[in-house]
Image: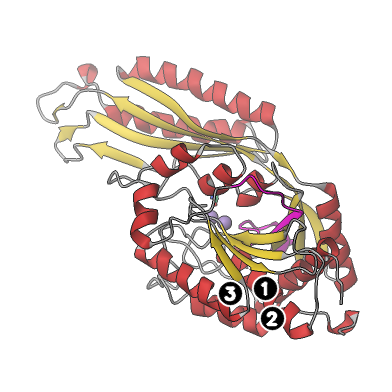
Amino acid sequence: MSEGHNLAINGDRLWDSLMEMAKIGATEKGGNCRLALTDLDREGRDLFVAWCKAAGCTIRIDRMGNIFARRAGTNDDLPPVMTGSHLDTQPTGGRFDGVYGVLAGLEVIRSLNDLGIATEHPVEAVVWTNEEGSRFAPAMVASGVFAGAFDLEYGLSRADVDGKTMGEELERIGYAGPEEVGGREIHAFFETHIEQGPILEAEEKEIGVVTDAQGQRWYELNVTGQESHAGPTPMPIRKDALLGASRIVDLVNKVGLDHGPVGCATVGMMQVHPNSRNVIPGHVFMTIDFRHPDADQLLSMDRQMREGVAEIAARSRVEVDVEEIWHSPPVPFDRSCVEAVARATAELGFSSREIVSGAGHDACYISRVAPTSMIFIPCIDGISHNEVEDAKPEWIHAGGNVLLRAMLAKAGRVA
Ligand code: HGY
Ligand code: MN
Ligand code: MN
């Protein structure tokens, strides 16, 4: 029977698992590219499933491709204590975003096995499909279907830029599972993740006790002008879609600054048509990503953007169609789960602070159907969604040990 002092994960094994997984979709600059439901995503999923089976887990896969690796409890009829995150990455992603939370969950299961600890509730390590929202929009769509934020048909019909749907790609890679999505009780859910921002490292805190996640509003804009010749077309009569779009980029930046210091506003995608150097662009597709922890402030950002876009359209003699494609309200996490994380952190003597998540996570949707909270560790220079994303092994170990104790607090340690 393990006592408190050796109630610990095998941090080196967790680090090695991360580095092994990072070989799948490795990029030249040291990052990862495993876009959702690509062959590389399948490879990562297959490796995770193999590791979980080797750890004695049973595997269930639902119709959105969410993977549930289950370690039985002594009272297996009780709802599980779950932990997990995502294996899909950004195109220029890092080795830790998402995958750390998935493999920390596996490490908890491996460690419970090593320590001979039985839990009353079953424990599940989870992979949520398409968290990033990069290949298929919106983000967190599969955990959203699980939580009832979207219906299954909506989730399966999300299409990439080539028109391939999630449903088709799940079939193609063999992860269109038989299980219904959601609708089952979860005792508690924890997600371990790098902060993806600079606060913890700057304040030299080892753990972030996440209390909330900020809200998000995503938009797609189509700016329509008139293609014409770059030479004979006088400046005053042009209908230049890229000029309009460029003014909107500046507007979006101003909206973010006007809602500072926490508001964030980003134009991440822009496609110019016909993208020919001597044709005045007739059409631009672009995206807007707004974030704020306060719902009213998010609404204010929406309003300022829409008013500004109308003024720019008139001034630039273009049409602008604004479609809000996703709205994820701010999320307060469950106090009892937050306290379980805080207690585990204090028991282990890690430096910590409460923190609001700037990024969205699957935990945001799962919090709608289960008591949920998150555990953050710092990342180097606060950089993420970038191939240089990095973390110190001691941070990786710390987050895994906090997760082990927080989960045990909820799962009930029997022996
Ligand atoms: O966009 C986000 O916050 C997350 O990384 N999908
Ligand atoms: Mn993530
Ligand atoms: Mn991410």
- In terms of sequence position, does the residue under pointer 1 or pointer 2 come before the other? 2
- In terms of sequence position, does the residue under pointer 2 or pointer 3 come before the other? 2
Q: Residue shown at 82%/69% (left/top)?
A: 405
Between marks 1 and 2 in the image, the one whose residue lies nearer the viewer: 2
Q: Is residue 380 left or right of residue 310?
A: right
Dot 3 falls on a residue whose secondary structure is helix
Residue type at tag 3? Cys
Q: Toward the viewer: 17 or 80?
A: 80
Colour option used: secondary structure
Q: Position of residue 338 (x, y in %)?
A: 82, 53
Q: CA distance from mark 2 to mark 3?
A: 17 Å
Q: Residues within 10 Å of mark 1 (few under 14, many from 20)?
A: many
Dot 1 falls on a residue whose secondary structure is helix
Q: Identify the residue under disc 2.
A: 11
Residue type at tag 1? Ile
Residue type at tag 2? Gly
- Number of callouts: 3
Q: Identify the residue under disc 1.
A: 396
Between marks 2 and 3 in the image, the one whose residue lies nearer the viewer: 3
Vertical relation: 211 (above or below) 219: below
